[in-house]
């Protein structure tokens, strides 16, 4: 529920096929209107870097008002937005149906799409976010890819920083030779007809991250669902397009939406539910795709059949009850609730799911990790990303739970890096050890079932 409003937020379709959508004069006029409302409100001053940039520009201008800010500087505000959606979904009382009709993140998205249309492309980010191509190449030689991206490899990380603007201190995900899709084909999940959720059928949308960077998330989900009697299939047509969405490449996202809907709807027609393993992808499938393609019946039908993985497990627990066999996780869990999970307006399902594990303390961390997808690893952003995520990292560091968890694997890695910085600032002798990896909540549920050791996302 958003602060200060009882109405559910309503989002307008994204008119990316309308030439006006890319008209920079109209975009700047809308930014004037929205930024002036935000200047009077300032509620979001500590949500991210975008609002502090805006408020500093205003406060440091000659007039102390928005009219004193050079419009060329609006780009700084747009560039600082990670499209986390927190201002729209959680904070802002002026979103539609309010008459102010304010949608800050989608305005930043429109600005980026217009910049891109005008030919301002960031080649480095463009290459970095081609997740399928990068994943396919890296999975052919994972040893080489992981050697090159290792934080201790000064030579390649220096090169990556100068060529692709990836900060040499930012931890990057590892790659696997055997992707989740290939592993799942080798080990089809079997349904146990006696288990509580027998009769349910799921197609797991593998997501690029679980497929190439952490198949353990997929394997843990397969194991948990099979233990609960769910018949499971795995599909990975292509990336959901979130990295392209962040860059304003809306035509590419629309194409991905159409392709994935075509690939997954035959399962839906046979009675399967669609479960996405990473919240950013579930958010795209459930909310952003239908806004991009409001007249596409297939995309709409897929959206209605899609669940976030934690949402789905909690649904089983509420309707059929979970299969027995969960054992306590000694030492408890500190779980970060990812922004894109909160933006799905489904409640804190990761916490609810972990609370199903008996006698296991669960500490919830609802603030932003600061990572922001590809944004947070770039030179110039990484330190800001750590600063934004410091309250979460500090809370986890203080809490001393054995397991660090986030539904967003990149956020999990980023929190660990923030904890290392905090540990390094402590006097020697008072430093607490920082866990070497974070886990998706479903990996911890699998662990509580005794279904094999979870791999987790490492630093
Ligand atoms: S979407 Fe997130 S990053 Fe962008 S302005 Fe809103 S809170 Fe800040
Ligand atoms: S987005 Fe809404 S809540 Fe946030 S500063 Fe602007 S007007 Fe205020």
Image (cartoon, rainbow, N blue to C red):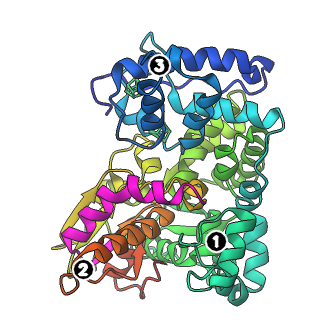
- Residue 18 percent coordinates (x, y): 78, 20
How packed mark 2 is, by other alpha carbons closer than 10 Å (few <14, some 14-19, many 20 or more), is: many
Q: Residue furthest top?
A: 99
> Which residue is found at the position 60% from the left and 30% from the top?
73
Which mark is first along the chain, 2 or 1?
A: 1
Which mark is first along the chain, 3 or 2?
A: 3
The residue where tag 2 is placed is: 329
Q: Identify which residue, 399 or 42, lies in the foreground.
A: 42
Q: Which image quadrant: the N terminus?
A: top left
The residue where tag 3 is placed is: 62
Quadrant of the rendered structure where residue 164 is?
A: bottom right
Instruction: For mark 3, give the secondary structure.
Output: loop
**Magenta span contains residue 390:** yes
Q: Nearer the viewer, mark 3 or mark 1?
A: 3
The residue where tag 1 is placed is: 211
**Magenta span contains residue 143:** no
């Amino acid at each position: 529920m958003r602060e200060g409003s009882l109405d559910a937020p309503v989002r307008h379709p994204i008119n990316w096929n309308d030439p006006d959508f890319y008209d920079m004069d109209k975009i700047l006029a809308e930014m004037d209107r929205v930024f002036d409302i935000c200047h009077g409100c300032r509620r979001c001053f500590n949500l991210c870097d975008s609002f502090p940039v805006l408020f500093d520009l205003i406060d440091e201008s000659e007039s102390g008002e928005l009219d004193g800010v050079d419009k060329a500087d609006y780009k700084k505000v747009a560039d600082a937005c990670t499209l986390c959606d927190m201002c729209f979904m959680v904070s802002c009382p002026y979103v539609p149906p309010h008459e102010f009709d304010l949608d800050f993140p989608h305005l930043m998205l429109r600005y980026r799409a217009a910049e891109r249309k005008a030919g301002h492309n960031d080649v480095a980010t463009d290459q970095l976010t081609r997740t399928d191509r990068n994943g396919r190449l890296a999975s052919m030689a994972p040893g080489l890819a992981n050697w090159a991206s290792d934080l201790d490899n000064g030579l390649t990380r220096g090169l990556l920083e100068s060529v692709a603007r990836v900060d040499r201190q930012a931890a990057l995900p590892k790659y696997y030779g055997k992707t989740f899709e290939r592993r799942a084909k080798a080990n089809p999940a079997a349904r146990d007809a006696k288990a509580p959720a027998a009769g349910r059928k799921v197609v797991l949308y593998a997501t690029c991250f679980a497929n190439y960077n952490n198949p353990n998330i997929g394997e843990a989900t397969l194991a948990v669902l099979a233990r609960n009697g769910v018949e499971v299939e795995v599909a990975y047509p292509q990336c959901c397009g979130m990295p392209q969405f962040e860059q304003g490449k809306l035509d590419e996202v629309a194409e991905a939406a159409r392709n994935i809907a075509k690939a997954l709807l035959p399962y839906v027609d046979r009675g399967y539910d669609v479960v996405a393993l990473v919240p950013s992808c579930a958010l795209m499938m459930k909310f952003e795709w239908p806004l991009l393609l409001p007249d596409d019946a297939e995309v709409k039908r897929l959206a209605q059949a899609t669940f976030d993985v934690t949402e789905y497990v909690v649904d089983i627990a509420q309707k059929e009850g979970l299969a027995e066999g969960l054992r306590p996780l000694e030492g408890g869990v500190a779980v970060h609730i990812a922004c894109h999970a909160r933006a799905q307006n489904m409640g804190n399902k990761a916490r609810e799911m972990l609370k199903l594990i008996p006698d296991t303390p669960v500490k919830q961390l609802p603030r932003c990790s600061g990572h922001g997808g590809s944004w947070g690893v770039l030179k110039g952003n990484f330190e800001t990303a750590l600063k934004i995520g410091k309250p979460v990292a500090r809370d986890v560091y203080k809490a001393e739970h054995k397991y660090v968890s986030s539904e967003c694997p990149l956020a999990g890695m980023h929190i660990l890096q923030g904890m290392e910085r905090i540990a390094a600032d402590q006097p020697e002798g008072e430093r607490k050890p920082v866990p070497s990896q974070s886990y998706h909540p479903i990996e911890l549920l699998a662990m509580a079932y005794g279904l094999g050791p979870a791999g987790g996302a490492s630093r």
